[in-house]
Each structure stands twice: as structure tokens, then as C-alpha cells.
Amino acid sequence: MSEAIYDEQIAPLLMQAGKLCEQHGLAMVAVVEYGKEQRGETRLLPEGSGLAMHMLSMLAASGNNIDSYLIKVIRFCKLEGIPLDESMFLRQYGAAQRAQQREGQPNA
């Protein structure tokens, strides 16, 4: 029943909101959970969207997989030139990566 309500009533409204955001160059991340681990998502990230919006989008795409989320964040930061040292958690990951490189081990 909840999925039908999402599909018939909520998703069309989110699509309208997404179109308005797109017309005005706004970023949008909307996630609706209509059942345990069952979600509908609307994500729109125009060029120049901020890190927070990208992180929300990555989290929505990862569901309940924390490792998937962190891998996406690390890849995004590397791609965008955002230092991992800005996060106390990712700083430890970066330090481990640098230690492996010094020892000649492949990156994980």
C-alpha cells in the first residue's frame, strides 16, 4: 500500500519539484522510505553543486551500505581535489594509504 501511494501521489510531486529545480539550476536530493529498506529517490545535481548535496546523493545511492557510502565519498574527494585530511576519519584512511605506498603495496 505505501509503495502505491509513493508511486501514484508522491513521486509525481517530486518530479515536478525536480523540474522546477532543474529550470533554476538548483540541486535537489529527496528520499522517501515507504517500507523498511524500500525507498524512492529523486536526485538532481547540476554543475557546481556543493559537497553536502553530493554527500546526500551518495548516501541515498548507498542505502544501508556504509562502506559503499565511504568509498563514494573518498572517490569524490579525490576527483574534486578535496583533501581527505579535512575529516578525522578519512585522515586515518589517507595515512594508511600513504603508508602502503611507501611500502610499495598496492592501494586498497
Image: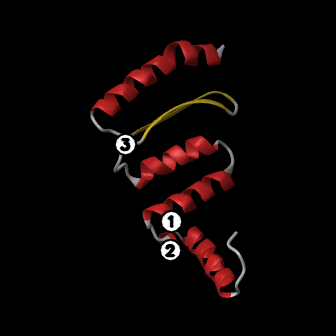
What amino acid type is highlighted by mark number 1? Lys
Look at mark 1 in the image and give the residue it sits on: 78
Query: For numbered disc 3, what is the local secondary structure?
Result: loop
The residue sitting at the bottom extreme is 102
Say above or below: 14 vs 9. Answer: below
Look at mark 3 in the image and give the residue it sits on: 46
Colour logic: secondary structure
Say above or below: 63 vs 99. Answer: above
The numbered disc on residue 50 is none
What amino acid type is highlighted by mark number 2? Asp
- Distance between mark 1 and mark 2 Cα atoms: 11 Å
At x 39%, y 29%, the residue is 18
Query: For numbered disc 2, what is the local secondary structure?
Result: helix
The numbered disc on residue 85 is 2
Q: Is residue 12 left or right of residue 90?
A: left
Foreground: disc 2 or disc 3: 3
What amino acid type is highlighted by mark number 3? Pro
- Looking at the rendering, in which quadrant would you find the C terminus? bottom right
User: Crowding at label 1, few (<14), some or many (≥20) Cα neighbours within 10 Å?
Assistant: few
Q: Is residue 40 left or right of residue 38?
A: left
At x 63%, y 45%, the residue is 62
